[in-house]
Amino acid sequence: MRNMGVTKDDILVVHSSMKELLKCKLAPKDILDLFVTQLLPHGTLVCPTFPLYPREPKGVERLRANTCNVEYSYNVQKSRTWTGDLGRLLMKMPGARRSLHPLNTLTAYGKDVDQIFSKETIHSLDLPCGPDSPWSTLVSLKAKVLMIGVDIAHSLTMIHVAEDCYEESWPINNWYRQRPFHIINNNTEYHVTVRERHPKWSLSYAERKLSRDLITSGLVQQANIGSLTISLIESTSLISYLNARKDSAFPYYLCWLSAL
Protein backbone atom coordinates (compact mmCIF):
# COMPACT_ATOMS: atom_id res chain seq x y z
CA MET A 1 0.00 0.00 0.00
CA ARG A 2 2.83 2.39 0.82
CA ASN A 3 4.26 1.97 -2.71
CA MET A 4 0.92 3.11 -4.13
CA GLY A 5 0.83 6.27 -2.04
CA VAL A 6 -1.29 5.19 0.91
CA THR A 7 -0.10 6.95 4.06
CA LYS A 8 -0.68 6.24 7.74
CA ASP A 9 -3.14 9.15 8.11
CA ASP A 10 -5.29 8.33 5.06
CA ILE A 11 -8.98 7.50 5.03
CA LEU A 12 -9.12 4.29 3.02
CA VAL A 13 -12.31 2.81 1.56
CA VAL A 14 -11.68 -0.87 0.85
CA HIS A 15 -13.66 -3.07 -1.53
CA SER A 16 -12.45 -6.66 -1.58
CA SER A 17 -13.18 -10.19 -2.75
CA MET A 18 -12.59 -12.85 -0.12
CA LYS A 19 -12.73 -15.48 -2.87
CA GLU A 20 -9.69 -13.92 -4.51
CA LEU A 21 -7.90 -13.29 -1.22
CA LEU A 22 -8.33 -16.90 -0.14
CA LYS A 23 -6.55 -17.98 -3.32
CA CYS A 24 -3.53 -16.15 -1.92
CA LYS A 25 -3.95 -17.89 1.47
CA LEU A 26 -5.12 -14.64 3.08
CA ALA A 27 -7.91 -14.91 5.66
CA PRO A 28 -10.34 -12.01 6.28
CA LYS A 29 -9.10 -11.45 9.83
CA ASP A 30 -5.47 -11.31 8.66
CA ILE A 31 -6.37 -8.65 6.09
CA LEU A 32 -8.34 -6.63 8.62
CA ASP A 33 -5.48 -6.78 11.13
CA LEU A 34 -3.07 -5.60 8.43
CA PHE A 35 -5.18 -2.56 7.61
CA VAL A 36 -5.72 -1.68 11.26
CA THR A 37 -1.97 -1.94 11.92
CA GLN A 38 -1.10 0.17 8.88
CA LEU A 39 -3.72 2.91 9.34
CA LEU A 40 -4.49 3.32 13.02
CA PRO A 41 -4.28 5.39 15.16
CA HIS A 42 -3.78 8.19 12.61
CA GLY A 43 -5.93 6.95 9.72
CA THR A 44 -9.38 5.45 9.16
CA LEU A 45 -10.60 2.23 7.55
CA VAL A 46 -13.95 2.17 5.75
CA CYS A 47 -15.76 -0.82 4.24
CA PRO A 48 -19.12 -1.22 2.50
CA THR A 49 -21.63 -3.08 4.67
CA PHE A 50 -24.76 -3.07 2.51
CA PRO A 51 -27.65 -4.71 4.39
CA LEU A 52 -29.07 -7.98 3.14
CA TYR A 53 -32.83 -7.84 2.57
CA PRO A 54 -33.80 -11.49 1.95
CA ARG A 55 -37.29 -10.64 0.66
CA GLU A 56 -36.08 -8.04 -1.81
CA PRO A 57 -36.65 -8.99 -5.49
CA LYS A 58 -33.61 -10.37 -7.30
CA GLY A 59 -32.36 -10.33 -10.88
CA VAL A 60 -34.75 -9.23 -13.60
CA GLU A 61 -37.60 -9.11 -11.11
CA ARG A 62 -35.77 -6.31 -9.29
CA LEU A 63 -36.12 -4.19 -12.42
CA ARG A 64 -39.84 -4.85 -12.69
CA ALA A 65 -41.02 -4.96 -9.09
CA ASN A 66 -42.64 -1.93 -7.52
CA THR A 67 -41.11 -1.63 -4.05
CA CYS A 68 -42.31 1.90 -3.36
CA ASN A 69 -44.88 0.63 -0.87
CA VAL A 70 -42.90 -2.29 0.57
CA GLU A 71 -41.15 -1.47 3.84
CA TYR A 72 -37.97 -3.38 4.71
CA SER A 73 -36.34 -3.36 8.14
CA TYR A 74 -32.73 -2.33 8.68
CA ASN A 75 -31.10 -2.83 12.07
CA VAL A 76 -27.98 -0.65 12.15
CA GLN A 77 -26.14 -2.85 14.62
CA LYS A 78 -27.47 -6.28 13.62
CA SER A 79 -28.53 -6.47 9.96
CA ARG A 80 -26.34 -8.85 7.99
CA THR A 81 -24.20 -7.48 5.21
CA TRP A 82 -23.86 -9.04 1.76
CA THR A 83 -20.78 -7.03 0.73
CA GLY A 84 -18.05 -9.25 2.15
CA ASP A 85 -16.36 -10.60 5.24
CA LEU A 86 -14.04 -7.62 5.70
CA GLY A 87 -16.94 -5.26 6.38
CA ARG A 88 -18.69 -7.86 8.52
CA LEU A 89 -15.63 -8.16 10.75
CA LEU A 90 -15.09 -4.41 10.83
CA MET A 91 -18.63 -3.93 12.20
CA LYS A 92 -17.62 -5.96 15.26
CA MET A 93 -14.61 -3.80 16.13
CA PRO A 94 -15.16 -1.75 19.32
CA GLY A 95 -15.54 1.86 18.22
CA ALA A 96 -16.61 1.03 14.65
CA ARG A 97 -19.69 2.86 13.38
CA ARG A 98 -22.18 1.91 10.68
CA SER A 99 -24.20 4.42 8.70
CA LEU A 100 -27.90 4.96 9.32
CA HIS A 101 -28.84 4.92 5.65
CA PRO A 102 -30.40 1.57 4.64
CA LEU A 103 -28.84 1.68 1.16
CA ASN A 104 -25.15 1.82 0.16
CA THR A 105 -24.39 1.44 3.86
CA LEU A 106 -20.79 1.67 5.09
CA THR A 107 -18.85 1.08 8.31
CA ALA A 108 -15.88 3.18 9.47
CA TYR A 109 -13.24 2.60 12.13
CA GLY A 110 -10.47 4.96 13.20
CA LYS A 111 -9.60 8.59 13.80
CA ASP A 112 -12.11 10.24 11.43
CA VAL A 113 -15.24 8.26 12.29
CA ASP A 114 -17.12 11.17 13.88
CA GLN A 115 -16.29 13.48 10.99
CA ILE A 116 -17.35 10.93 8.36
CA PHE A 117 -20.82 10.69 9.93
CA SER A 118 -21.07 14.36 10.99
CA LYS A 119 -23.83 15.25 8.49
CA GLU A 120 -25.87 12.06 8.65
CA THR A 121 -28.94 12.14 10.88
CA ILE A 122 -32.10 10.09 10.82
CA HIS A 123 -33.96 13.20 9.65
CA SER A 124 -31.54 14.01 6.82
CA LEU A 125 -31.66 10.61 5.13
CA ASP A 126 -32.47 10.89 1.45
CA LEU A 127 -30.14 9.82 -1.35
CA PRO A 128 -27.61 7.19 -0.27
CA CYS A 129 -24.67 9.17 -1.67
CA GLY A 130 -26.28 12.63 -1.32
CA PRO A 131 -24.90 15.83 0.26
CA ASP A 132 -25.49 14.69 3.86
CA SER A 133 -24.22 11.16 3.34
CA PRO A 134 -20.96 9.66 4.62
CA TRP A 135 -20.01 8.95 0.99
CA SER A 136 -20.13 12.67 0.19
CA THR A 137 -18.14 13.50 3.32
CA LEU A 138 -15.51 10.93 2.34
CA VAL A 139 -14.97 12.84 -0.90
CA SER A 140 -14.60 16.14 0.95
CA LEU A 141 -12.07 14.43 3.25
CA LYS A 142 -10.13 13.21 0.18
CA ALA A 143 -10.55 9.53 0.95
CA LYS A 144 -8.80 6.98 -1.21
CA VAL A 145 -10.54 3.90 -2.59
CA LEU A 146 -8.69 0.58 -2.65
CA MET A 147 -9.96 -2.37 -4.66
CA ILE A 148 -8.55 -5.81 -3.81
CA GLY A 149 -9.38 -8.59 -6.25
CA VAL A 150 -12.51 -6.83 -7.53
CA ASP A 151 -13.27 -4.99 -10.74
CA ILE A 152 -12.79 -1.24 -10.47
CA ALA A 153 -16.07 -0.07 -11.95
CA HIS A 154 -18.28 -2.96 -10.81
CA SER A 155 -17.70 -2.21 -7.12
CA LEU A 156 -17.02 1.53 -7.17
CA THR A 157 -19.93 2.87 -5.09
CA MET A 158 -18.22 6.25 -4.90
CA ILE A 159 -19.29 7.11 -8.47
CA HIS A 160 -22.85 7.70 -7.26
CA VAL A 161 -21.72 10.83 -5.40
CA ALA A 162 -21.52 12.45 -8.84
CA GLU A 163 -25.22 11.71 -9.35
CA ASP A 164 -26.65 12.18 -5.86
CA CYS A 165 -24.71 15.30 -4.81
CA TYR A 166 -25.27 17.15 -8.08
CA GLU A 167 -28.86 16.16 -8.76
CA GLU A 168 -29.80 19.50 -10.31
CA SER A 169 -27.29 19.01 -13.13
CA TRP A 170 -27.91 15.30 -13.75
CA PRO A 171 -29.28 15.12 -17.32
CA ILE A 172 -31.65 12.13 -17.01
CA ASN A 173 -35.17 12.61 -15.64
CA ASN A 174 -36.86 10.20 -13.23
CA TRP A 175 -33.51 8.85 -12.09
CA TYR A 176 -34.76 7.96 -8.61
CA ARG A 177 -37.60 6.08 -6.97
CA GLN A 178 -38.82 6.24 -3.37
CA ARG A 179 -38.36 3.43 -0.84
CA PRO A 180 -39.82 3.17 2.70
CA PHE A 181 -37.69 1.63 5.47
CA HIS A 182 -38.05 0.70 9.11
CA ILE A 183 -34.74 1.61 10.80
CA ILE A 184 -33.73 0.27 14.19
CA ASN A 185 -30.78 2.03 15.84
CA ASN A 186 -30.01 0.53 19.24
CA ASN A 187 -33.36 0.86 21.07
CA THR A 188 -34.86 3.54 18.84
CA GLU A 189 -37.05 2.87 15.79
CA TYR A 190 -37.91 5.11 12.86
CA HIS A 191 -39.94 4.92 9.69
CA VAL A 192 -38.33 6.86 6.85
CA THR A 193 -38.66 7.24 3.11
CA VAL A 194 -35.48 7.56 1.05
CA ARG A 195 -34.69 7.67 -2.63
CA GLU A 196 -32.52 5.33 -4.66
CA ARG A 197 -31.43 5.19 -8.28
CA HIS A 198 -34.00 3.06 -10.09
CA PRO A 199 -32.46 -0.37 -10.84
CA LYS A 200 -33.44 -0.11 -14.51
CA TRP A 201 -30.68 2.44 -15.12
CA SER A 202 -28.06 -0.19 -14.32
CA LEU A 203 -28.80 -1.65 -17.76
CA SER A 204 -27.17 1.47 -19.24
CA TYR A 205 -24.09 1.40 -16.99
CA ALA A 206 -21.00 0.96 -19.19
CA GLU A 207 -18.71 -0.40 -16.50
CA ARG A 208 -16.15 -1.90 -18.91
CA LYS A 209 -15.69 1.47 -20.60
CA LEU A 210 -15.46 3.25 -17.25
CA SER A 211 -12.77 0.81 -16.10
CA ARG A 212 -10.74 1.35 -19.26
CA ASP A 213 -11.14 5.12 -19.15
CA LEU A 214 -10.09 5.39 -15.50
CA ILE A 215 -6.99 3.33 -16.17
CA THR A 216 -5.97 5.07 -19.42
CA SER A 217 -6.54 8.49 -17.87
CA GLY A 218 -4.01 7.64 -15.17
CA LEU A 219 -6.50 8.08 -12.32
CA VAL A 220 -6.13 4.46 -11.24
CA GLN A 221 -2.94 2.94 -9.93
CA GLN A 222 -2.66 -0.82 -10.20
CA ALA A 223 -0.35 -3.49 -8.82
CA ASN A 224 -0.36 -7.28 -8.81
CA ILE A 225 0.53 -9.67 -6.02
CA GLY A 226 0.55 -13.06 -7.72
CA SER A 227 -2.91 -13.44 -9.25
CA LEU A 228 -4.36 -10.65 -7.06
CA THR A 229 -4.96 -7.26 -8.67
CA ILE A 230 -4.95 -4.19 -6.42
CA SER A 231 -6.28 -0.84 -7.66
CA LEU A 232 -6.24 2.58 -6.01
CA ILE A 233 -8.07 5.80 -6.91
CA GLU A 234 -8.49 9.12 -5.12
CA SER A 235 -12.14 10.02 -4.55
CA THR A 236 -11.78 13.73 -5.33
CA SER A 237 -10.12 13.01 -8.68
CA LEU A 238 -12.81 10.45 -9.50
CA ILE A 239 -15.71 12.82 -8.83
CA SER A 240 -14.04 15.67 -10.73
CA TYR A 241 -13.53 13.33 -13.68
CA LEU A 242 -17.17 12.22 -13.67
CA ASN A 243 -18.56 15.74 -13.18
CA ALA A 244 -16.64 16.95 -16.23
CA ARG A 245 -18.50 14.37 -18.34
CA LYS A 246 -21.90 14.67 -16.72
CA ASP A 247 -23.65 16.37 -19.67
CA SER A 248 -23.70 13.03 -21.48
CA ALA A 249 -24.70 11.10 -18.31
CA PHE A 250 -21.33 9.31 -18.40
CA PRO A 251 -20.77 6.45 -17.56
CA TYR A 252 -24.32 5.58 -18.63
CA TYR A 253 -25.17 5.10 -22.31
CA LEU A 254 -28.42 4.69 -24.29
CA CYS A 255 -30.50 5.53 -21.24
CA TRP A 256 -33.57 5.96 -23.42
CA LEU A 257 -33.54 2.18 -23.95
CA SER A 258 -33.52 1.55 -20.20
CA ALA A 259 -36.46 3.92 -19.81
CA LEU A 260 -38.68 1.88 -22.15
Image: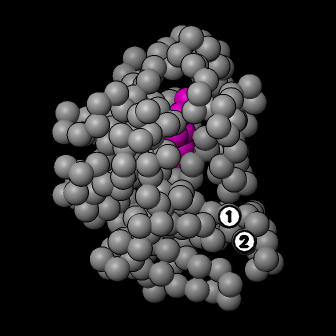
Q: Position of residue 239 (x, y in %)?
A: 29, 56
User: What residue is drawn where x is 58% and y is 19%?
Assistant: 67
Q: Visible in this render: residue 140?
A: no
Label 1 close to label 2 by CB (< 8 Å): yes
User: What residue is drawn where x is 40% and y is 64%?
Assistant: 210
Work out how far the residue at label 1 is from the one at label 2, CA to CA, in angstroms: 5 Å
Q: Position of residue 216 (x, y in %)?
A: 34, 80
Q: Nearer the viewer, residue 3 or 191?
A: 191
Q: Nearer the viewer, residue 127 or 80?
A: 127
**Is residue 160 depicted above or below 42 in this figure?**
above
Structural crowding at the residue carrying mark 1, measured as other residues with C-alpha within 10 Å and reported as few (<14), some (14–19) or many (≥20): some
As helix, strand or loop, the secondary structure at mark 1 comes to loop
**Is residue 8 depicted above or below 99 in this figure?**
below
Amino acid type for the residue under numbered disc 2: Glu
Q: Visible in this render: residue 156?
A: yes
Quadrant location of residue 233? Answer: bottom left
Q: Which residue is mark 2?
A: 20
Q: Which residue is mark 1?
A: 17
Q: Is residue 236 shown in magenta?
A: no
Amino acid type for the residue under numbered disc 1: Ser
Question: Does 101 sit left or right of 58 as displayed?
Answer: left
As helix, strand or loop, the secondary structure at mark 2 comes to helix
Label number found at residue 163: none
Q: Is residue 105 shown in magenta?
A: yes
Magenta range is 102-108
Q: Nearer the viewer, residue 233 or 173?
A: 173
User: What residue is drawn where x is 56% and y is 11%?
Assistant: 69
Q: Position of residue 136 (x, y in %)?
A: 34, 44
Question: Which image quarter holds the C terminus?
Answer: top left
Structural crowding at the residue carrying mark 2, measured as other residues with C-alpha within 10 Å and reported as few (<14), some (14–19) or many (≥20): some
Question: Does 244 sit left or right of 55 as displayed?
Answer: left
